[in-house]
Image (cartoon, grey):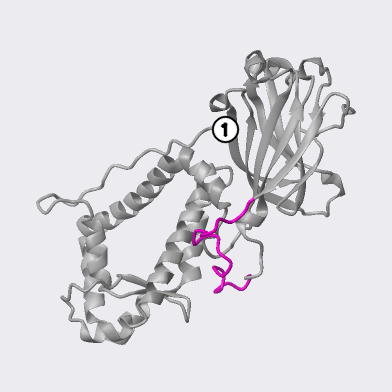
Amino acid sequence: MAAGSSSTEELHRDQIEVHHGKRLDSPAYWDIDDDDDDDDDNCGPRPHELYGTFTWTIENFSQIYNKELHSNSFDLGGYKWCLLIFPQGLENAISAYLSLFLCVVNPDELLPGWSRFAQFTLCVVNKDTTKSKYSDTLHRFWKKEHDWGWKKFIELSRLDGFLVDDVLTIRAQVQVIRERIDRPFRCLDELYRKELCKVYLTNVESTVRRFIEERRRKIIKLINDERTIWSSLRAFWLGADPSSRQHLTRENTATILRPLVKHFFVEKEVTSTLLMDSLYAGLKVMKQVCKNREETAAGIQWAGENDSRSIPMVIIDKDSDMFVLTDDAILLLERFALFDSGPHQEIGGGKSSENCSKNI
């Protein structure tokens, strides 16, 4: 839908409170200054620099008869945005609802091929803040979709509880996302991430569990139902010389992470941004573990195969940016297949949780 302009300065005012994200005294490892030291683009903006909030205060709301109403523009994440509402709702079946959208300012004046990728939350504030109405989504803004939001944000009949002295307050949180092609990337400002986690953490966990279970079932099927193939694989592995095994158990991180990112990062899925943050955080933890164990290579020489010393089964070689298996690959696959199975249970597929992502 195209957004028109309205002359309504006498009926509303914008509370230009654009709060940009600020790092805490002890920032988490996904939002520190040197956490891109292994990337080519280590001078790019951090999530807290691409995040902010905007408050729009609309006075004399009950006296507004304009079909549509724009806020003043505000700068967030290096771009200009505005909010758009339809005070009387849109036509036909959805006229009973307040419609609310986030818009790109002056899209026709931007260069051809422009796009902006953003996670955002819009809120109509209730005088009892525990009853405020929130909705959030993930969207790529471009020429044909330069405004995005909700046609049925809230019923007009419910707005009385949101008006204070005939003033309606709308807040926006906008996180512009810096896309990374070949690796997990930080998406979200730390505080915004925590807010979304309160709503979507269960969805993130179920999505990851389903992903793991799907892979586990495939390996179980290979072991149980494709015995000839599995036996051939075992024979090949056992017959390979140590140098060949070492070569087969090393892979560049980009080769592994690119399909992983592609699998999880689904546009318009709110949980996918949290999944990207989780992947990134996990990668940073692995790198920190490897950094703290610089003696691992020497340790493997003196630690016996059955030594109980804690050596990670997967490590990251920071110098060459490689994932490296430090255990027997066949054993790792068999352990993974038996994960969560009792000693007397047959290998079988586990149940996966359904994704309960909020429909927006």
Counting every numbered tag in the picture gives 1
**Picture residue at 39% right of the left edge, 49% below the top:** 208
**Picture residue at 25% right of the left edge, 86% below the top:** 301
State the predominant SS element of the stretch in magenta: loop
Say which amino acid is labelled 1.
Answer: Ile
- For residue 55, what is the image quadrant? top right
Residue 303 percent location from the top left of the image: 21, 82
**What range of the chain is rendered magenta?**
21-41
- What SS does tag 1 mark? loop
Along the line of sight, the residue nearer the viewer: 196 or 337: 196
Along the line of sight, the residue nearer the viewer: 94 or 200: 200
- For residue 313, what is the image quadrant? bottom left
Q: Is 26 one of the magenta-colored residues? A: yes
**Picture residue at 82% right of the left edge, 21% below the top:** 67
Q: Is 59 one of the magenta-colored residues? A: no
Residue 16 located left or right of residue 7? left
Residue 238, can we see it? yes
Residue 114 position (above or below residue 121): below
Mark 1 = which residue? 360
Residue 80 position (above or below residue 40): above
